[in-house]
């Protein structure tokens, strides 16, 4: 058994956890396996939130009304607050798109929005919870925690990312040359 309590420390106290779709989908599928992680984050008084677009992405994957209801119930159980994409997040999204464009990387718009939301709250205790290492590369984001979640057949690895203003400024310098 992986000792998440050794990984999750008091630096996470009162943090705001921005949830990516891949986390909530896996939590829905393997709820029991995630109980320890959720419990530990709760003990640290973490608050969950995400963008309304992530919520829609999560519930759209089901074509049966009962499953949609179960997903909505799960969402409410976790008390995930939703945030709308505001003008600052839109502006940040455009900035991040320009930097990613120089690297030839293409992402879903929701990933850009998540990165832009982290950018908006860079000076707070806001972290993104995702398993998506490819889309949140280390050119703009720092990995603060690696959180393995054990299943019967495999181990899922999630990351808590923080937006790095220093890395962003460095990438911006390269972009504007």
Image: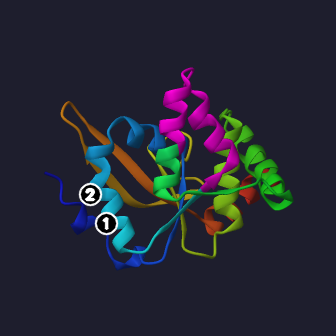
State the image coordinates of residue 149 (x, y, percent, origin top left).
28, 47
Left or right? Give the position of 43 relative to 73: left
Residue toward you, 59 or 85: 59
Q: Is residue 173 magenta?
A: no
Q: Quadrant of residue 120?
A: bottom right
Residue toward you, 171 or 5: 5
Residue toward you, 7 or 61: 61
State the image coordinates of residue 43 (x, y, percent, origin top left).
34, 73
Q: Residue at x 57, y 20 (%)?
A: 63
Instruction: Name the dominant secondary structure of the magenta segment.
Output: helix
Res. 40 mark:
1
Q: Quadrant of residue 151?
A: top left
Q: Quadrant of residue 72?
A: top right
Rendered view: 90 above or below 58? below
Rendered view: 163 above or below 12? above
| Residue 177 appears in the rendering | no
Left or right? Give the position of 126 relative to 174: left
Q: Is residue 52 magenta?
A: yes
Left or right? Give the position of 3 relative to 176: left
| Residue holding disc 2 | 36
State the image coordinates of residue 31 (x, y, percent, origin top left).
33, 43
| Residue 50 appears in the rendering | yes
Element at label 2: helix
Q: Residue at x 75, y 59 (%)?
A: 173
Decide: marks 1, 2 in contact (CB < 8 A)?
yes
Q: Residue at x 62, y 43 (%)?
A: 55
Q: Which residues are magenta?
A: 50-72
Q: Residue at x 34, y 45 (%)?
A: 157
Rendered view: 143 above or below 27? below
Left or right? Give the position of 72 relative to 177: left
Q: Alpha-carbon distance for marks 1 and 2? A: 6 Å
Q: Residues within 10 Å of mark 2 (few under 14, many from 20)?
A: some
């Amino acid at each position: 058994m992986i000792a998440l309590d050794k990984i999750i420390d008091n630096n996470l106290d009162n943090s705001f956890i921005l949830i990516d779709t891949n986390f909530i989908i896996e939590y829905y599928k393997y709820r029991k396996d995630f109980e320890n992680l959720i419990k530990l984050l709760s003990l640290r008084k973490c608050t969950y939130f995400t963008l309304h677009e992530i919520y829609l992405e999560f519930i759209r994957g089901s074509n049966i009304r009962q499953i949609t209801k179960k997903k909505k119930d799960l969402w409410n159980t976790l008390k995930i607050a939703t945030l709308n994409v505001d003008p600052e997040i839109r502006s940040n999204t455009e900035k991040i798109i320009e930097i990613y464009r120089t690297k030839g990387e293409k992402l879903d718009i929701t990933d850009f929005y998540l990165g832009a939301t982290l950018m908006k709250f860079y000076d707070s205790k806001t972290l993104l919870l995702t398993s998506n290492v490819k889309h949140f590369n280390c050119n703009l984001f720092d990995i603060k925690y690696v959180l393995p979640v054990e299943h019967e057949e495999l181990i899922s690895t999630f990351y808590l990312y923080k937006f790095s203003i220093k890395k962003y400024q460095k990438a911006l310098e390269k972009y504007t040359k």
